[in-house]
Image (cartoon, rainbow, N blue to C red):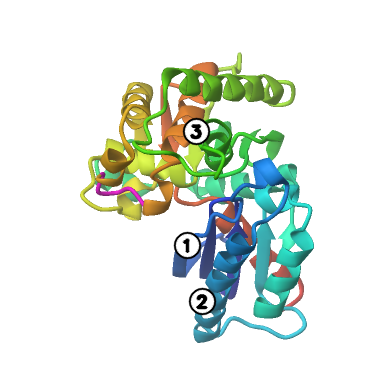
Amino acid sequence: MKRVTAIDCGTNSIRLLVADIDPDTGALHELDRRMTIVRLGQDVDRTGRLAPEALERTFAACREYAEVIREHGVPGGPHPALRFVATSASRDASNREDFVRGVRDILGVEPEVITGDEEAALSFAGATRELTAHQNPAAQTQGQSPAGAGPYLVVDIGGGSTEFVVGDRAVRAARSVNVGCVRMTERHLADATGKVPEPGTPTEAQIAAIRADVEAALDTVEQTVPLRPTDGGYTLVGLAGSVTTIAAIALDLPAYDSAAIHHAVIPLDRVREITDRLLHSTHAERAAIPVMHPGRVDVIGAGALVLLALMERAGAREVVVSEHDILDGIAFGVAEVAERAGG
């Protein structure tokens, strides 16, 4: 078993996974998994720069994560078993070197600002490795449908971008487009200060504007990724906080429960119903939902609309929700590199 650490820093959140992995079987024993909403992508769509306060929130989370990594004894030295991956917000920012330097000073590793295609491949690896190895018996004991067989259409709805990947045991096609939940919220729902004004209920015109952006992005995706297959269809696998929050609402959970959410199957009609509810509720009403993280209250409606638009475009009747995503893909890659290096 290889003890590794993966950090995924996106537009809305930064996440940590410390795990022991068997590179031969792909078995992953999770030691610590946590998420912090830092909103690194605050105003990046408008200014093209990472805001100082957003950087400080992110660095504060990095300092917390550095302590967790030390506590778990993750190997360090010249080849640490740690990979830090940064995605949409840091790709788009003109001052991303400030971000890179700060992370390096705190964690001792160079953050990798990866491309959308690299992000898509890592998300696919994390989401499907377990599915391609075996059917999930835990899902069946909880009364959920077993996760479907490939080929898979994996959608990772992030804060700044969304990744679409088609494949079976390997990626066939992938595309990343800039329609994340934070970006759509800031572009269409926020005022000049970057805040969503009270009561926080989008107008029909604002909803239509988000939908138009998403539909245009899906047109772009279809130039590379066939969303509507002619050979029997895909198992749609949905990743990241917007999707898992929708699943938690659909399951009517009293509190967020990743074990119940992982590999839950949510039908299209339920996604449509929840999306409509989120888009037509106030900030206070969304905040009162038991499973709603405070950092998602203003952006969840846009994230839900991305998922709904995709399901309708792809003709998907349901989505399999995965708690395993890019973070797990990063960890698997670190373990494989360590195995090849003999450590």
Q: What's under tag 1, amino acid-wise? A: Thr
From the image, tell me which residue sits under label 2.
Answer: 64
In the rendered image, residue 79 lying in the magenta stretch gets the answer: no
Determine the image quadrant of residue 157.
top right
Q: Is residue 20 visible?
A: no
Q: Position of residue 296 (x, y in %)?
A: 42, 47
Q: Earlier in the sequence, mark 3 or mark 2?
A: 2
Q: What's under tag 3, amino acid-wise? A: Leu
Q: Position of residue 160 (x, y in %)?
A: 61, 43
- Residue closer to the observer: 193 or 266: 193
Q: What's under tag 2, amino acid-wise? A: Glu
Q: Residue furthest top?
A: 230
The residues tagged by marks 3 and 2 sit, at their Cα atoms, a distance apart of 32 Å
Determine the image quadrant of residue 246.
top left
From the image, tell me which residue sits under label 1.
Answer: 36
The label number, if any, that marks residue 281 in the structure image? none
Marks 3 & 1, CB-CB < 8 Å contact: no
Q: Residue at x 30, y 53 (%)?
A: 256
Q: Residue at x 49, y 44 (%)?
A: 195
Q: Residue at x 49, y 46 (%)?
A: 240
Q: As displayed, is residue 23 above or below residue 131?
A: below
